[in-house]
Image: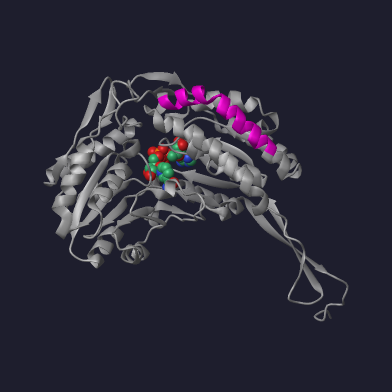
Amino acid sequence: MQIRNPRTGIYDYDLTEFSAEQVEKIAVNLRKEQSLWWQSGLEMRIEQLQLFAAEVVKAKPELVKAIEEDTGRWSESELEVDALVQTITRWCNDAPKLLDVVPARPASIPFLEIEQQYYPYPVVGVVSPWNFPLLLSFVDAIPALLAGCALLIKPSEVTSRFVETLSVVLAKVPQLQKVLALVTGGGETGQAVTNNVDILCFTGSVATGRRVGEQCAKLFIPAFLELGGKDAAIVCADADLDIASSAICWGSMVNAGQSCMSIERVYVDSKVAEEFKQLLVAKVSNLKHNYPAIKTGQVGPVISDKQVAVIEQQFQDAKQKNARFLCGGEVVNLGGGVYCQPTVVDNITPDMLIGVEETFAPVLVIETFSSEQEAVNLANATKYGLSGAVFSQDIEKAHNIAKQLIVGGISINDTALTGFVHEAEKQSFGLSGLGGSRMGDESIRRFIRKKALLTNTGVRSPWWF
Ligand code: NAD
């Protein structure tokens, strides 16, 4: 499989496509190794993951380079490697208290005793997308490994170059290597992963998520689906407009808008709409592409060429239906890479794709409201339910609006805080996902099943014949 470099447009990398037979063989092996991994205890698993983190730190330059070549961006590539190390450190600290064996306790029936046991799923599958290739391949994998599971990971075919370097890193941690396998390839390899695991963590689009969810239902295995979004920010008349415009500019344009929790819609009180738009458009217009030097500017190329078609279709549709582009509105070719101009659009109507479908680009639509209820209704008028933001200097009012939004996480007077705060549990509502939270303490328990050991302490049970 030939892989495209998003900065040059050149297909300059050969990716191995794992066949269904190869994936099956790897999974059989993982299953064999998992029981020793689990039975060797949490202390050993923590030790192995700490060793892994140390090796990742040593290999950081090579890993960053691989991610950079696949994603065309620099600071986010650094951030991904750092975040992997932080994720390992955090889970290694937290896992002992979260997986602690609960002492046996008396049941409500006096002569019975309860012992609660944990039993990990043997093989956990991870299928991840291209927007944060390393981070999203490991966000679920690290707690699952600590819980005692073996891991079969398939990153997006668009951004899998890092696998080569990571395999070298893994070879230095042989016990971990036995229970952690990365396979590369496209949808068929992903299907093979699903077919051979006991539980699946999928991050990606709604369309694929639905197919994967259906496959898991047929296989009778749990699926955790983290899918797309069309996050809204509400800006009240009493908001600090300078803060709101800076936060929203960042929250919608960072990583070229290629984050699930990107702000893609803004609803602003009509009383302050003109002033807010001016501030926002000035800030957005000031952003530059990271071209020709990767370490300049703020907005990288569109990583996946399939996404380019989605953006172009939404622009064309909005233009035909008379949306007003306050800035941006074009996809441009720079040195062979495709870049989306940072874009702000108003005069939106409900039939425009740009206002309802995920754009996954540095594109923001603005509408006005004249009452809080109208703002809530507009924000909730979506099939998605990932996250959102509310801006007001009256925190009680902001909280009251936030409570009415049908999404899994809200940032108040900021954006995308769910990407930074890992200890707060959040689920994805609507078509944005299915299953328990991947954040917060409870998330590690997704990978263990609970067994009840019930002991009669020596009495003839009164219900016997
Ligand atoms: P995608 O659905 O096209 O692909 C995701 C992964 O699924 C890839 O690894 C792909 O190879 C694999 N795949 C494709 N068909 C498959 C099949 N039938 N069975 C198993 N695997 C299969 O998504 P994408 O374009 O890579 O990623 C962008 C999407 O991901 C956006 O919608 C974005 O919002 C979403 N996303 C969500 C979150 C979240 O936490 N909610 C985070 C990041 C990205």
Q: Quadrant of residue 396?
A: bottom left
- Taking 255 as reference, is 243 above or below it? below
Task: Please provide the residue range marked out in magenta.
Answer: 47-68
Q: Note whether residue 384 is visible.
A: no
Image-based side of 300 in relation to 47, left or right = left
Instruction: Identify the residue at horizontal 61%, vertical 50% (top origin).
Output: 447
Residue 407 position, x and y percent, is: 38, 58
Does the stretch in magenta take in 15?
A: no
Image-based side of 447 in relation to 459, left or right = left
- Taking 16 as reference, is 408 above or below it? below
Residue 204 position, x and y percent, is: 43, 43
Q: Note whether residue 137 is visible.
A: yes
State which quarter of the image contains the C terminus.
bottom right
Q: Nearer the viewer, residue 458 or 353?
A: 458
Q: Quadrant of residue 4?
A: top left
Q: Quadrant of residue 412?
A: bottom left
Instruction: Identify the residue at horizontal 53%, vertical 50% (top origin).
Output: 223
Q: Quadrant of ligand 1?
A: top left
Instruction: Identify the residue at horizontal 56%, vertical 52% (top origin).
Output: 443
State which quarter of the image contains the N terminus.
top left
Magenta region, mostly helix, strand or loop? Answer: helix
